[in-house]
Image (tube, grey):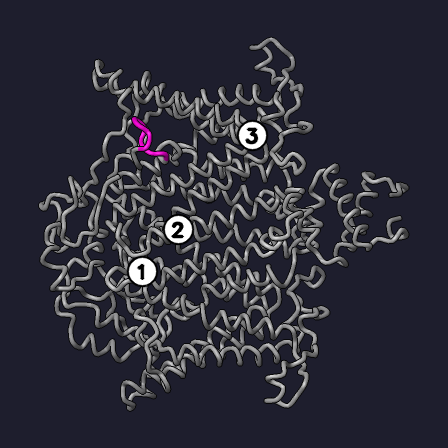
Amino acid sequence: MLELRHRGGCPGPGGAVAPPPREGEAAGGDHETESTSDKETDIDDRYGDLDSRIDSDIPEIPPSSDRTPEILKKALSGLSSRWKNWWIRGILTLTMISVFFLIIYMGSFMLMLLVLGIQVKCFHEIITIGYRVYRSYDLPWFRTLSWYFLLCVNYFFYGETVADYFATFVQREEQLQFLIRYHRFISFALYLAGFCMFVLSLVKKHYRLQFYMFAWTHVTLLITVTQSHLVIQNLFEGMIWFLVPISSVICNDITAYLFGFFFGRTPLIKLSPKKTWEGFIGGFFSTVVFGFIAAYMLSKYQYFVCPVEYRSDVNSFVTECEPSELFKLQSYSLPPFLKTVLRRETVSLYPFQIHSIALSTFASLIGPFGGFFASGFKRAFKIKDFANTIPGHGGIMDRFDCQYLMATFVHVYITSFIRGPNPSKVLQQLLVLQPEQQLNIYKTLKTHLIEKGILQPTLKV
Amino acid sequence: MTELRQRAVREPDAPPEDKESESEAKVDGETASDSESRAETAPLSASADDTPEVLNRALSNLSSRWKNWWVRGILTLAMIAFFFIIIYLGPMVLMIIVMCVQIKCFHEIITIGYNVYHSYDLPWFRTLSWYFLLCVNYFFYGETVTDYFFTLVQREEPLRILSKYHRFISFTLYLIGFCMFVLSLVKKHYRLQFYMFGWTHVTLLIVVTQSHLVIHNLFEGMIWFIVPISCVICNDIMAYMFGFFFGRTPLIKLSPKKTWEGFIGGFFATVVFGLLLSYVMSGYRCFVCPVEYNNDTNSFTVDCEPSDLFRLQEYNIPEVIQSVIGVTTVWMYPFQIHSIALSTFASLIGPFGGFFASGFKRAFKIKDFANTIPGHGGIMDRFDCQYLMATFVNVYIASFIRGPNPSKLIQQFLTLRPDQQLHIFNTLRSHLADKGMLTAAEDE
């Protein structure tokens, strides 16, 4: 991690301070030694100028140190640097995919922890970039406040979902009952405490920087925490809703790269000069096919298909159920032109495979916009990678940039087209009502169910 | 509106008459921003005087300090009178006013962003900001409208489809804006564009969620809208008065004119004011009842049986006050107890919203958010203390006052699958049987 101290007159180590000719008038790199103490120039002004200049005036943040492990370096020392880079990327890709499979095998709880871990790391990466851009590593309180806000927002979101899924567990414990009932109030109070601390921590010459970092933190929270929260909700719907979208995005990344490598000619967008139309379209078709096949293979297993439930007797997560209609093979008649090609009348498909086409299409057509957004962001702040966590690939954010929109899309898709409201949440809200209201609802429901023939009127308890 | 052009030429003079005119049009205590600005950095103001001519002539013979006082006073009374008229006109007009205030606040903050980043000419950006405002508003109002207008929505076929796929449609609209943003990135302006994108989103987060929660509170009963807002306004005015007459110890470096005496005096005055106001308002149905949409008359009605919160009850006064007042019990509405909580929040935490706005103005070296209201500044200046209040009231209501909405639960229930419905029904039945609510006859 680049060690950047506050530019109070001591130039940072290494390449942190840009060469003087690039700096421009008053907001200069080496000018501060004279200006800070006597003139009391507002530090905000110097950084304010940073904002108004066009991008090329802003110094580049040099890349951080190389983190490739020694073993790999020794093994590949004989190859040329281009192939070496290729090999490192390839090996790391396979490693990441194997880790992914391992965690899937270990179950939904581990997956949840993994998602949480990734979220915290992404937040850390983006905040670190913000610090580097504003050189505000020493602002009073700020690191504490950023992590505090992360904690608050996570507490709020996980409290909302945990209450639904762990309803039976929660009903047993008295303290948890209290926390759940007043959850919103407690979360709001926690957030307010952070807000007031921020206001009290405003320091005279650093207002603008502090407001920037405040806004930066909030936008980062908006992106990373909501996405990870939605990913976990998708996961609870059934692991297949977690696996197929993520794999489609990864597959799109890899196949677009391969198609671009072999057939690429027409550039796609000025933002990422290495992307090509051939890669884009080739990636699209391969991802749809891949999604189709992956959906077929995964739909067979209850482990992937069933909603994740918390069983209080075994005190763990179980995925056992009667698979819903979506995951039962059905016969579809082929449209006429496919009939002649495949020489079959009907084909047996899982309905989920039709949905997987929609998911893959989104992953290939709109997912890349998340990647372009991240590329634009990196160019705007003149960084090459978000961080250097994964050798050859960059930071965690670099791997997950295309996933941003995917999680939200899958969640919106599920709530709009697949399932209605969550039954356990409805039950939970029912139990919170006043007894008279419950009785009224009970009577209404009974009449409704009898009308529909779901409940037999003659049945006695 | 502050007229700001490119800061291509720094104004080293910062003309003396500029400082004087600023000291004339002083707003509540943000004068330290003037003292902070140095000669070489020009403050982003030099605003045009928006006071109507009529007032200018009427007050022309007074000294400038008193003139300012009178302008502020008259405008305050005008705004309060306007507030009363709107309340009289009913909930629908209130909703529209809240939306207009929201749009104006958004416009003010975005304009400041433009001025700070000199990015008035960035391609597409104005369009995209307004487009995002529209999307987020569509999403929020769609979520609430379907609850409150449920029967109306179910009747009309196009509305029903819109409400069923509401999230999907909102998400698609937002995505379109997002993709347009990515496609509009121009080579030399990436950073500016990302800043403006971030600025827009944070503004939306603040402004739109607050206004949405205000409308939620309004539907709960107009008293939940009026009492909090009045408490914040009262706290502003009372703290100013107490500070004016008794003020000595400064409160916070951020706003040098605020004093501890004003803060504490304002706190007590606001609590008393809240108690009195809730006593007066709890008597009237039109304030106390939830706003409902009546299908037959196709309008909003406020007619109901007031809940327990708004019925006079007898409370025993603790002994210590008994000897002072000489009365053993007192008749109060339970709502008045809640109003103490609301007033306390308005006086103790509400000002932090004001400090936040002051810090913001100093950070970007602006004197006021805009110049819409003569003597007061922009709409945001008036509403800065209200930020947190609306959220607090909403969270308070959701946590302590009402539970989930029964009719909404029934709707959700009806969309479930039959086996899920049966499961819930049976659970409810056993729960009620446990509580002894079900007699054998009722279970038939």
| Residue B330 x/y as whole percent | 66, 83
> Based on the displayed image, in which of its 4 quarters is residue A55 positioned?
top left
Report which residue position mark 3 lands on. Answer: A239
Q: Which residue is mark 2?
A: A218
Identity of the residue drawn at 62% across and 48% down:
B159
Q: Amino acid at mark 1?
A: Ile
Crowding at dot 3, Cα within 10 Å, few <14 / some 14-19 / many 20+, comes out as: many
**Residue B351 or residue B363, whichever sits in front:** B351
Element assignment for label 1: helix
Can residue A397 be seen from the camera position used here?
yes
- Which residue is identified by label 1? B112
Are labels 3 and 2 assigned to the same chain?
yes
Q: Are marks 3 and 1 in contact (CB under 8 Å)?
A: no
Which chain hosts label 3? A
Considering the image in quadrants, where does the C terminus of chain A appear?
top right
Residue B81 vertical position relative to residue A1 in the rendered view, above or below = below
> Which residue sits at x=50%, y=64%?
B390
At label 3, the amino acid type is: Met
